[in-house]
Image: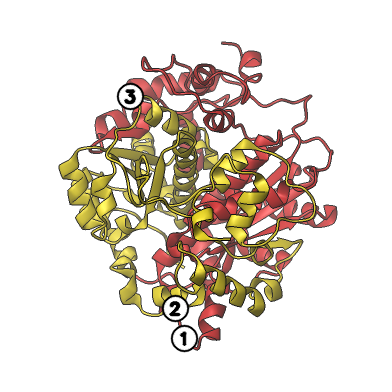
Chain colours: A red, B yellow
Amino acid sequence: MSDSTVSSFSAQSSMNALWQARYGTKPPAQPLPESPVARSLMAHRSVRHFSPAPLPEGVVEAAIAAAQSASSSCNLQAWSVIAVRDPARRARLARIAGDQAFIAQAPLFLVWVVDLSRLEHVGHAQGHALPGLDCLDTFLGGVVDTALAGQNAAATFESYGLGLVYVGAVRNQPEAIAAALGLPPRTVALFGMSVGYPDRARPTPIKPRLPQAMVLHEERYNPATATDEASINAYDALLAASRAGGKAWSASVVARLGDVSALHGREQLPAALHALGFVLGKA
Amino acid sequence: MSDSTVSSFSAQSSMNALWQARYGTKPPAQPLPESPVARSLMAHRSVRHFSPAPLPEGVVEAAIAAAQSASSSCNLQAWSVIAVRDPARRARLARIAGDQAFIAQAPLFLVWVVDLSRLEHVGHAQGHALPGLDCLDTFLGGVVDTALAGQNAAATFESYGLGLVYVGAVRNQPEAIAAALGLPPRTVALFGMSVGYPDRARPTPIKPRLPQAMVLHEERYNPATATDEASINAYDALLAASRAGGKAWSASVVARLGDVSALHGREQLPAALHALGFVLGKA
């Protein structure tokens, strides 16, 4: 199918059409049960060109209510989120986070923060030290909490016709982000999220993904399907031909991971986390 | 409101009713814009009692298509998922993961895996070493990828009337889980997910969360609202009175983090990750 067709898919498209756009292959023989929620999620694309239109009232409150409704490990709720609307602050954060213009362009930049600070405070208030805070697993639980929350917010924004993009580049310079946002010790920005109405003049197509058989295993991990050469070659070709990709997947993996300089500072993350007050335990 | 009322809330309830159930307070003055997706997400509860009824055809394929449609850092797609249906294997995994009976009871147990193995294979196939794999940030990116995917799957399952619970206890003994599922080096189970129809005889109420003002900050992190004593006291009382909580939040934080023995082995996670082939870099 042509890319102009792909970019027209939306949550109003059929489950089968969205499957075809995502995988570039026919849907499975058994029918996919109808679900407006699944259609909305399957229609996701990362939007990097925004209209200047403001967000409607109440959408942030609804998105954060959905975020807080996500599961949380042991109900620790180990995250916070900073809503940055001020244009000057967004411009500054854009410079810190990889010079990405859309951070300054979109009316809202949410910074999703792993937050063990609140828990430390609760322990102190009860007169308890909390040695469990100094374990890698507790940090990881906070990362998962934050990501589940962020994804519920993302799904909610998209359900209102808004677009968004995750911004991992807030981890390029975590200490600079912390300083700009006044983050206390034991907190770190995990990802940002630019939110606004998509620029209709620059629509974004759906990005194809690896075949489902490469990521979904039955009963036990199957190394043969996970790294099937023919499937990787087919995906390389699909992505290279897509306006959303434009490059073979294998080549992009090597470009990202073949040299640590491509990580733009993120290779220093252990030192940054230490400086931000996290203790991740030792092997 | 009574707990029996709370447990009757569903994706068909109004946005305002779901807000009230989640926070125990009136919704904000500005109206929450209507969204069936947001209502479905806000109606989430962790289900731990399942009917033996099998899953309908096609729901797993749809859930994984939604999972793969979530954002992925640099499109690395650094995750896999194992669908465990065999009752004997579920019973074995239940024993490894904290003796939780619902893992054996629900017809499906999904194990969500951070997967850098596939990327390493892609590098080898192209004749490239990938030093970027040996960075904490790359592992964290995989954790975020996995969590975003898992949450899209969770939202899809719930949209079909299915229930689920996240199972962090797969990290109690990551090497035993890896052995049971044949996981290759550079993969680790991040969380499990039991999925099935909820047991109607044992409905689960919505669990109240911290007030939104404690987690949502405007422009900069506000330590005063993040740790507001009156808000924590009110939440402690709300949760203690709820059938979904039954205990003050502050007390449960101290119970979980006040002694590393409460982590049930997860304090050994750095060593387990090392044994599973991960190199997380040094501070």
Q: Which dot marks residue A229? A: 3
Residue in the foreground of this view, choosing between A191 and A96: A191
| Numbered disc 3: secondary structure | helix
| Numbered disc 2: secondary structure | helix
Q: Which is nearer the N-term, disc 3 or disc 1?
A: 1
Q: Position of residue A102 (x, y in %)?
A: 74, 42
Q: Are marks 3 and 2 on the same chain?
A: no
Q: Which dot marks residue B254? A: 2
Q: Position of residue A99 (x, y in %)?
A: 72, 47
Residue A184 visible in the picture: no
1 and 2 marks in contact (CB < 8 Å)? yes
- Residue at 30% from the left image edge and 55% from the top image edge: B170
Q: Amino acid at mark 3?
A: Glu
Q: Nearer the viewer, mark 3 or mark 2?
A: 2
Q: How many marks?
A: 3
Query: For mark 3, does the 10 Å Cα neighbourhood hold few (<14), some (14 to 19), or many (20 or more) residues?
Result: few
* Chain of the residue that carries numbered disc 2 in the rendered image: B
Q: Amino acid at mark 1?
A: His
